[in-house]
Amino acid sequence: MSTRHAARRAKLRQRIREQKLDALLVTNETNVTYLSGFSGDSTWLLVTRDHEVLISDSRYTTQLEEECPGVETNIRTNKVKHSDAAAASVHKCGIKSLGIEGHSLTIEQGDQLRECLAGVMLECMNWAVEELRAVKDADEIAETRVAVSLAARGFDYLKAILTPDMTELQLSHELEHAMRRFGASGVSFPPIIAVGDRGALPHYRPGDRMIGEAATLLVDWGAQTRSGYKSDLTRTLVTGKLTRKFEKIYITVLEAQEAAIAAIQPGARCADVDAIAREHIRKAGYGKYFGHGLGHGIGLNIHELPRLSPISPQCLEPGMVVTVEPGIYVPGWGGVRIEDDVLVTRDGFEVLSATVPKSLAASVIRTNR
Ligand code: ZN
Ligand code: ZN
């Protein structure tokens, strides 16, 4: 049995005891992966105070044996509903009070659970596993480093092959292909590759714009490792003539980002880190052009706790990995975003993506004409 997953379940048991429940039924698939190592889907994990059961079906019998050796399984047949199989495990373990993940169950699943668990007290234990996931262990940090380095290598390749006649979609494909060739299991999310004024749309989807059609290129991308850990980076490149306006906006974003990163340390309030970048951008006169939060945790999901935003209630802790990604988006003109992945260390921070250049000079690149 994997000691790393057992250690995570031990932390969860502490939470279950604190909430005075007998068990938690983990139904969020990413949370099941985090707590058990199982990488498939359609599987729930019942964690009691001293035991655990994976509830799945026969498609996964072999995979469960391989990925979760030593963990009890309840493999339902195709005549049994998933919720009924879960209820059988709950009853078998003598559970009287059960935590459920109300934030990720559908209303239908909730109704089914209530029906087949009549007599068991159900109580929401929302975000409990996600809160544990916010603080990465050594294995997760190592995986994230790999995800960042795969993304960095992919971006180096991308910059080397840029030509004015390539489209956003072609670049997106080349970037994904390169990262997969280097060993990624895929992208963290479909890359955002935005030429010129399209950069003003923070979650733009690449289209047929050609690189040579405008002077700037925003690239937001990430790689995923085989075990599912993700990186998330953004760089804004100048592929044509550098203008005074771009220079001013770029420097403003870069300074805002660096000031916010410098404030990262254990105990810092996430909302305060956000405010540092936001205030810098506001003072430069671009306050209304920075609408989104400063950053987010990354891990098995691309957006995890903690959130760096004005309304985030959280404080940073050693082991958290967050993006820091201020941006200025001017409709009709374009946008600049600079995003790095930052590890909170015992005494401050480490920029995991420090090898990806972001000075203004480094962002002005020559395309192969
Ligand atoms: Zn991003
Ligand atoms: Zn991001």
Image (tube, helix red, strand yellow):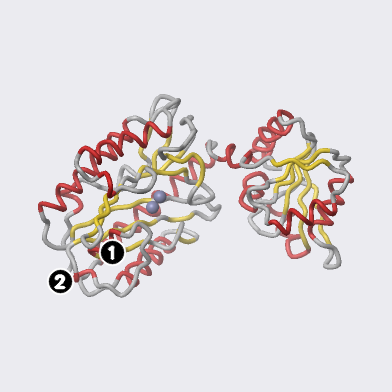
- In the rendered structure, the answer to whether residue 282 lies left or right of residue 309 reads left
- Observer-side mark, 2 or 1, equals 1
Residue 257 location, x and y as percent? 29, 40
Q: Secondary structure at mark 2?
A: loop
Q: Earlier in the sequence, mark 2 or mark 1?
A: 1
Distance (Cα) linking label 2 and label 1: 22 Å
Q: Residue at x 84, y 46 (%)?
A: 90
Disc 1: CA contacts within 10 A as few (<14), some (14-19) or many (>=20): many
Residue 208 location, x and y as percent? 31, 75
Disc 2: CA contacts within 10 A as few (<14), some (14-19) or many (>=20): few
201 relative to 88, above or below: below
Image quarter for residue 281?
top left
190 relative to 99, above or below: below
- In the rendered structure, the answer to whether residue 227 lies left or right of residue 49 reads left
Q: Find disc 2 in the rendering and name its residue.
A: 369
Image quarter for residue 326?
top left
Quarter holding the C terminus is bottom left
Q: Find disc 1 in the rendering and name its residue.
A: 198
Q: Amino acid at mark 1?
A: Arg
Q: Are marks 2 and 1 in contact (CB under 8 Å)?
A: no
**Extreme residue toward the front, this view:** 288
Residue 238 location, x and y as percent? 18, 58
